[in-house]
């Protein structure tokens, strides 16, 4: 039986100047994700975690979208509403700390004008890296939270 705090990783991505690149694994350190175009820009926004739920919201409105188009680094099959500020997420040896919800960016209008409104509270959540390491798609995450039940 799957633990309610167990997080399945669906896909991993890095941002490049030409778009997102799907990866089998990513290397993270205190500055973020190595080879990501946002590496070293903001430790509190080092990793963007998005849920498959965000994609479901968009698709329910007959808007075609592929995983990765929301700009996430880690796509999970988990209710990210359970992730609260200062919660920790263990993935292998990596330790991430949740910092803030992801804001809606103008580039989402390129997908469809309705997307920013659809994802107002559901785009994703940012995390900073507490303990460096490698995250592989085959790994599972485990949430540590005072709020998770």
Image (tube, helix red, strand yellow):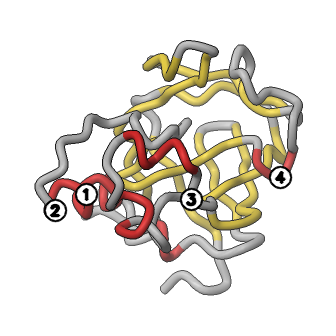
Which mark, residue 58? 1
Q: Position of residue 17 (x, y in %)?
A: 63, 15
The CA distance from mark 1 to mark 2 is 5 Å
Query: Marks 2 and 3: in contact by CB < 8 Å?
Result: no
Mark 2 = which residue? 61
Q: Report the residue marked by disc 4.
A: 44
Could you tell me how far apart the alpha carbons at marks 4 and 3 are, in whole angstroms?
A: 16 Å
Residue 23, position in %: x, y? 47, 17
Q: Earlier in the sequence, mark 1 or mark 4?
A: 4
- Of label 4 and label 3, which has the lower sequence position? 4
Q: Nearer the viewer, mark 4 or mark 3?
A: 3
**Residue at 51%, 76% in the rendered image:** 82
Q: Which residue is mark 3?
A: 104
Q: Nearer the viewer, residue 80 or 92?
A: 80
**Badge 3 local density, few (<14 within 10 Å), some, or many (20+)?**
some
Q: Position of residue 114 (x, y in %)?
A: 32, 61
Distance (Cα) linking label 4 and label 2: 32 Å
Instruction: Report the side of 97 relative to 147 (left or right).
Output: right
**Front tag of 1 and 4:** 1
| Secondary structure of residue under mark 2 | loop
Q: Residue furthest front?
A: 113
């Amino acid at each position: 039986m799957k633990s309610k705090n167990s997080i399945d990783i669906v896909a991993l991505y890095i941002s490049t100047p030409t778009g997102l690149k799907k990866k089998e694994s990513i290397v993270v350190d205190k500055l973020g994700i190595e080879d990501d175009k946002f590496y070293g820009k903001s430790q509190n926004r080092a990793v963007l975690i998005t849920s498959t739920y965000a994609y479901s919201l968009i698709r329910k409105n007959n808007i075609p979208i592929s995983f990765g188009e929301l700009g996430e680094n880690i796509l999970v099959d988990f209710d990210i509403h359970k992730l609260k500020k200062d919660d920790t997420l263990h993935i292998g040896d990596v330790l991430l700390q949740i910092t803030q919800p992801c804001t809606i960016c103008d580039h989402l209008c390129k997908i469809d004008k309705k997307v920013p409104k659809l994802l107002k509270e559901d785009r994703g959540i940012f995390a900073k890296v507490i303990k460096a390491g490698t995250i592989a798609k085959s790994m599972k995450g485990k949430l540590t939270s005072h709020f998770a039940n």
